[in-house]
Image: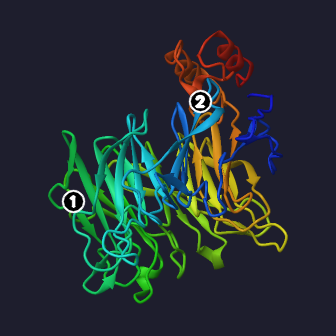
Amino acid sequence: MVSKTHRRAAYAVAFSFALNVAAFAGDTTVLLDPSPNPKGALGSAIVLTPEWILVGAPGKRLTFGASTVSSGAILRWARDASGAPVGAPTIIPPSGQKAGERFGLAFDAGATTLVVGSPGYTAVAPSFAVGRVRVLSLGTGAVLNSLAPPSAGPGSPQYGAAVATDDLTIVAGAPDRVLANLITGSVYVLNKNGPSWSVPANGILSAPVTAPYVGFGSAVGLTDAEVLVGAPGGISLPQAQHGRVYIYDRDALGTPTTTLLAPTPTLGDRFGTAIATEGTLLAVGAPGNDCDDGVVHLYRKRGDSYTFEATLTAPDSLGWTGFGSDVAIDRERVAVGSGGIKTEWELGFRAAVFRKAGDSWTLEATAAGNEAPAAGAVALDAAGLAFSDPLDRGGAVRYVALPRLPDLDFDGVVGPTDLGLLLGAWGTNTVWADLDASGEVGAADLGVLLGAWSD
């Protein structure tokens, strides 16, 4: 665990990290736009890669030639060996930019590419937000492809409101797409074909439940075998109001193989507002549960089916609201975002991190943002937690270094299996096994693990 506090010139300033669990006392940093504008909305989306912290600012104003427009941008900070942000951010702009396109509202990163949604991109008239998805080089920020929706239809489908990628496939949500005169939403699956992208057979997915404002495509996910789609709402059919997550075979598409509902569905849950998956674990946010207090439901994939595992709830009695508005997973850790807490004097975006220990899930820590109304994003990896904070109307992101835990297999004890995992990562920069945050797994990490060995 790192003990020093980073201070980063004008771009990142140290802050007081509010903890409900004493385990988190790592390096903390606030990431700011060096040239903010009041409606920049920095922190609307966050992605952590081993090399970068990427933050969306969909309201950022940029100057192109003689014009200044609110097109949006992504700000990219480099990370040092411990995972902490360093230096000033690089500004990644859109190409063929348009005012109000909200570039950076949603994005995802593969190993080499960055896929960015611009759901407000207008192609016909100022009130007709068709949307656009751009593919960029993760390393250089250069735009490689600018993808219009394969079939938009009438209205403003908001194509690119949610995206996921693994470099070979893009999943893009258009939750306001009109079908059969109803705003139900669609999801587009595109596969890489040389330098271009194409829709495979059955690659345009539509909501199985026909009801207005289902929000199909409000959240999307992608694994090696599956495409996941969140549909958190609906206003007419009771079964649509609970929210659902639909899971498709990546190679077949067409009809969902699995439909998930909350264990005890209630009206207004908004189950499926946020989804995250890694390995066998799936987390689904339901921020509307219990009059907007919110919960997160965890599922475990075993074979071809998903089994409910646990429900995560707000960790204290301060009246969190919108708990589950965003979720992120790293191995057997889950980060949960909340829109704020229900007090007159403190309504900042909050985050909580849970981890699995043996057969149960326990709270590691909570963090409070600035005292202003907010809704935003969380991102998580073995090195740190990042979450959005309004700070002022321009937005900000708070980053905190996480403790490196010697219980590498999350079974609740430190023993031979953990030793085997550490030795398997010996000499590499594998973050979860780099217990001293030095940038390389070695003798010092072995000492940390042996010092925590369970009797």
Q: Is residue 273 above or below residue 453?
A: below
Residue at the limit of the structure toward the front, as seen here: 66
Q: Say which quarter of the image contains residue 449.
A: top right
Left or right: where 423 falls relative to 320: left
The label nearer to you, 1 versus 2, is 1
Task: Return the residue nearer the eye: 327 or 249.
Answer: 327
Query: The C terminus lies in which quarter of the figure?
Result: top right
Q: Amino acid at mark 1?
A: Gly
Q: Position of residue 65 (x, y in %)?
A: 46, 51
Q: Neighbour class for label 1 at 10 Å: few (<14), some, many (≥20)?
A: some
Height in image: 49 above or below 20? above
Tell me the number on the disc at residue 408. 2
Earlier-in-chain disc, 1 versus 2: 1
**In the depicted structure, whether residue 179 falls above or below residue 403:** below
Give the residue pinned by disc 1.
Answer: 203
Residue 181: x and y, percent? 28, 87
Q: Is there any visible trace of residue 281 in the rendered image? A: no
Residue 278 is situated, as x and y percent measured from the top left of the image, at 46, 44
- Viewed as shown, does residue 316 lie left or right of 328? right
Residue 114 placement, left or right of 255: right
Residue type indicated by callout 2:
Leu
Q: Residue at x 65, y 14 (%)?
A: 446
Report how far apart the C-alphas of labels 1 and 2 lie in the structure. Answer: 38 Å
